[in-house]
Image: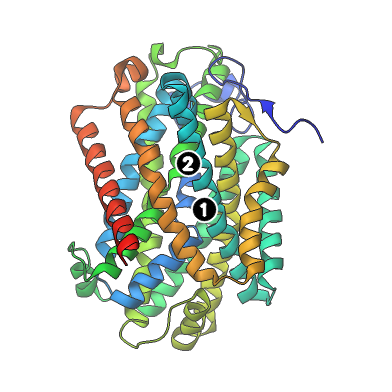
């Protein structure tokens, strides 16, 4: 085996591959063709917002509390839109990802601390994704969970192989898997029907005891995903650098000096709105289905298997099959996205990277240990989302500090209102996490 660590290239200082291979100048003759090349990163980020952890927390919330916590999903999706917009804007304005910008702007001890917690978040992320894929394979084909975990890891690695041939191929396949997830829940929602009045009442913010707060924190952890805050900035910066290279300006050119930089924010915003909007609808559909079918009837929904069986009993085998296929697509896609994000985290914070095979093996080990140990997989999914919620401030606070800085962002620096809104989001997440710690310590 080669050395464990290899130097990572600095995308702001060395040539970098454009997404999907460098686009030709012929393809960039019109402003429309240039802007079209900025679409795609948000659909990769959106996969993380409908990963298997969302299935567990959303169905648990809907089955136990009905429509009560629907507002948490709506609020979380609004937060996600803002956060991913800032991440994409950072990549566009600087040509660098968030971890790399942290390494260039913050003291070394701070950077090392940010890297350490980001790696823990990446492990929690992979835990949810591999377990989700294993459960789906068990539901569909009866595979034992450890075998399903290995299959999920292998498929995720195969999907990552597409990235070596260009970001665009990886993004297209990921967007296709997102479409499978959305189609599955659209099908089940149509079968279950909608109670518009109850849905409207669920958008009013309120809680019902400490357990609802715990589930709300888990939903938030599954909605605002720290690892794709890092990844989104990387993908957008890669698109911007590819556009520069094809336009003949060179990958090392300062994007802030380009006259055509600001119009690119239009397609970046639309990319985020569409990608994250679809993910938000899928999350809402999960809770609404559970609230409509499981909450009033008292059907158990303590595990993913319970949800699958409940759908089969109330809506038929077609609904259960759609659910299992959506879960499988989520596990496969989100596991590859999580490993990709891990590469961005290490190379950005440390300036080093691991071969993808090594990275995949390291992130797969904790998941396989949980599966072989016989830990309840649904409980592991829910608690992995709580762990993820603790990582949000460590990604969000540096993002706010950087995107408000005009020396970093140029003309794309945040307006005061944007910074204020992002600061409120960060404060809310930190407060929820502090309450969760207190509740855990005091029973």
In the image, 58 versus 194, the foreground residue is 58
> What's the distance in space between the residues labelled 2 and 1, CA to CA?
11 Å
Left or right: residue 139 versus residue 382 is right
Q: How many marks?
A: 2
Please, is residue 230 above or below residue 138 in the view? above
Q: Position of residue 77 (x, y in %)?
A: 32, 52
Q: Position of residue 424 (x, y in %)?
A: 22, 42
- What secondary structure is found at the residue carrying circle 2? helix
- What secondary structure is found at the residue carrying circle 1? helix
Q: Residue at x 43, y 79 (%)?
A: 301
Left or right: residue 17 versus residue 415 is right
- Tell me if mark 2 has few (under 14), some (14-19) or many (20+) residues whose alpha carbon lies within 10 angstroms of its own: some
Q: Residue at x 59, y 41 (%)?
A: 340
- In what quadrant of the picture does the C terminus appear? bottom left
Q: Position of residue 346 (x, y in %)?
A: 57, 33
Q: Which mark is residue 117?
A: 2
- In what quadrant of the picture does the N terminus appear? top right
Q: Residue at x 53, y 72 (%)?
A: 322
In the image, 132 versus 82, the foreground residue is 132
Please, is residue 43 above or below residue 193 in the view? above
Please, is residue 308 above or below residue 52 in the view? below
Q: Quadrant of residue 300?
A: bottom left
Q: Which residue is mark 1?
A: 124
Q: Residue at x 54, y 66 (%)?
A: 327
Q: Position of residue 74 (x, y in %)?
A: 28, 57
Q: Are marks 2 and 1 in contact (CB under 8 Å)?
A: no
């Amino acid at each position: 085996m080669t050395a464990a660590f290899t130097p990572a290239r600095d995308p702001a200082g060395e040539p970098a591959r454009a997404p999907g291979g460098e686009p030709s100048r012929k393809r960039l003759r019109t402003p429309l063709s240039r802007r079209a090349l900025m679409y795609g990163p948000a659909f990769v980020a959106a996969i993380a917002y409908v990963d298997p952890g969302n299935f567990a927390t959303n169905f648990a919330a809907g089955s136990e509390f009905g429509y009560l916590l629907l507002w948490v999903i709506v609020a979380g999706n609004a937060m996600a839109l803002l956060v991913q917009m800032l991440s994409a804007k950072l990549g566009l304005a600087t040509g660098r990802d968030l971890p790399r910008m942290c390494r260039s702007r913050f003291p070394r001890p701070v950077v090392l601390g940010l890297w350490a917690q980001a790696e823990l978040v990446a492990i929690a992320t992979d835990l949810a994704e591999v377990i989700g894929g294993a459960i789906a394979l068990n539901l569909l084909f009866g595979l034992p969970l450890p075998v399903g975990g290995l299959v999920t890891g292998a498929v995720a690695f195969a999907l990552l192989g597409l990235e070596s041939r260009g970001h665009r191929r990886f993004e297209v396949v990921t967007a296709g898997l997102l479409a499978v997830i959305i189609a599955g829940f659209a099908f089940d929602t149509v079968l279950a029907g909608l109670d518009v009045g109850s849905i409207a009442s669920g958008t009013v913010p309120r809680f019902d005891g400490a357990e609802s707060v715990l589930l709300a924190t888990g939903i938030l952890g599954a909605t605002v995903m720290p690892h794709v805050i890092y990844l989104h900035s990387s993908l957008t910066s890669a698109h911007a650098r590819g556009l520069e290279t094809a336009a003949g300006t060179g990958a090392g050119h300062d994007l802030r000096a380009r006259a055509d930089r600001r119009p690119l924010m239009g397609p970046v915003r639309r990319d985020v709105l569409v990608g994250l909007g679809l993910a938000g609808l899928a999350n809402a559909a999960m809770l609404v289905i559970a609230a409509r079918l499981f909450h009033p009837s008292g059907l158990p929904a303590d595990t993913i298997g319970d949800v699958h069986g409940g759908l089969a009993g109330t809506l038929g085998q077609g609904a259960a099959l759609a659910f299992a296929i959506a879960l499988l697509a989520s596990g496969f896609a989100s596991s590859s996205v999580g490993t990709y994000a891990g590469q961005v985290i290490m190379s950005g914070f440390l300036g080093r990277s691991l071969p993808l095979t090594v990275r995949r093996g390291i992130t797969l080990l904790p998941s396989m240990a949980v599966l072989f140990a016989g830990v309840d997989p649904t409980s592991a999914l829910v608690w992995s989302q709580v762990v993820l919620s603790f990582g949000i401030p460590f990604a969000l606070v540096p993002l706010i500090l950087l995107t408000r800085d005009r020396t970093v962002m140029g003309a794309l620096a945040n307006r005061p209102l944007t910074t204020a809104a992002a600061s409120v989001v960060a404060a809310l997440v930190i407060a929820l996490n502090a309450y969760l710690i207190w509740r855990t310590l005091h029973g």
